[in-house]
């Protein structure tokens, strides 16, 4: 059975999709940009956008009863692969657990709203 996960503590969907979907013990988030949920404004710079995207993910996971340590897979989209190190520095501050999540990171030609980074995750309930 599928369950929609939605919280006002993360930006609303900017298209026909859910912030996250729970199926059995897994929660799949949609990609999160560095948009502040209170203002709807994209943060300035790749580090601030990364931090905000991860805060949005944290809020969505909390709504599902999960924490950042429950992430088992992450996918990071970068507008410029030269930002890889800067994004990793912020990402490392949020990711935890004895076994770190699997991750992919790819450069894309363009992100919605002119974003510099977008992150989606899969997390598992214990």
Image (tube, rainbow, N blue to C red):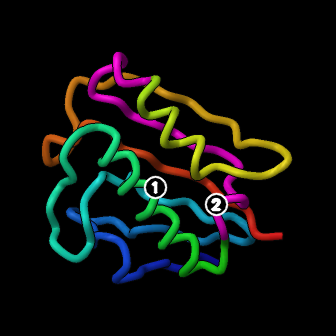
Q: CA distance from mark 1 to mark 2?
A: 9 Å
Q: Position of residue 42 (x, y in %)?
A: 18, 54
Q: Quadrant of the N terminus?
A: bottom right
The question of residue 75 being in magenta is answered with yes
At x 27%, y 67%, the residue is 13
Q: Local crowd at mark 2 within 10 Å, few (<14), some, or many (≥20)?
A: many
* Residue denoted by label 1: 54
Q: Quadrant of the C terminus?
A: bottom right
Decide which of 74, 43 is in the foreground and name it: 43
Q: Tell me where residue 125 sits by quadrant.
A: bottom right
For label 1, the SS is helix
Location of residue 84 with respect to 119 vertically, above or below: above
The question of residue 77 being in magenta is answered with yes
Location of residue 3 with respect to 49 vertically, above or below: below
Mark 1 or mark 2, earlier in chain: 1
Q: How many marks?
A: 2
Decide which of 85, 104 is in the foreground and name it: 85
Location of residue 49 with respect to 37 vertically, above or below: above
Location of residue 89 with respect to 67 vertically, above or below: above
Decide which of 122, 92 is in the foreground and name it: 92
Residue situated furthest top in the rendering:
82
Q: Check if mark 1's residue and mark 2's residue have beta carbons within 8 Å.
A: yes
Q: Position of residue 105 (x, y in %)?
A: 49, 28
Q: Is residue 73 left or right of residue 107?
A: right
Q: Position of residue 82 (x, y in %)?
A: 34, 16
Span of residues in magenta: 67-84
For label 2, the SS is helix
At x 67%, y 54%, the residue is 71
Q: Local crowd at mark 1 within 10 Å, few (<14), some, or many (≥20)?
A: many
* Residue denoted by label 2: 68
């Amino acid at each position: 059975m599928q369950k929609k996960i939605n919280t006002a503590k993360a930006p609303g969907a900017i298209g026909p999709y859910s912030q996250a979907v729970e199926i059995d013990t897994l929660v799949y988030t949609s990609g999160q940009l560095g948009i502040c949920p209170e203002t709807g404004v994209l943060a300035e710079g790749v580090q601030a956008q990364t931090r905000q995207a991860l805060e949005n993910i944290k809020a969505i996971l909390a709504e599902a009863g999960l924490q950042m340590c429950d992430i088992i897979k992450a996918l990071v989209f970068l507008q410029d692969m030269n930002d890889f190190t800067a994004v990793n520095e912020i990402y490392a501050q949020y990711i935890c657990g004895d076994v770190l999540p699997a991750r992919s990171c790819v450069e894309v030609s363009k992100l919605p709203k002119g974003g510099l980074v977008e992150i989606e995750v899969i997390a598992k309930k214990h």
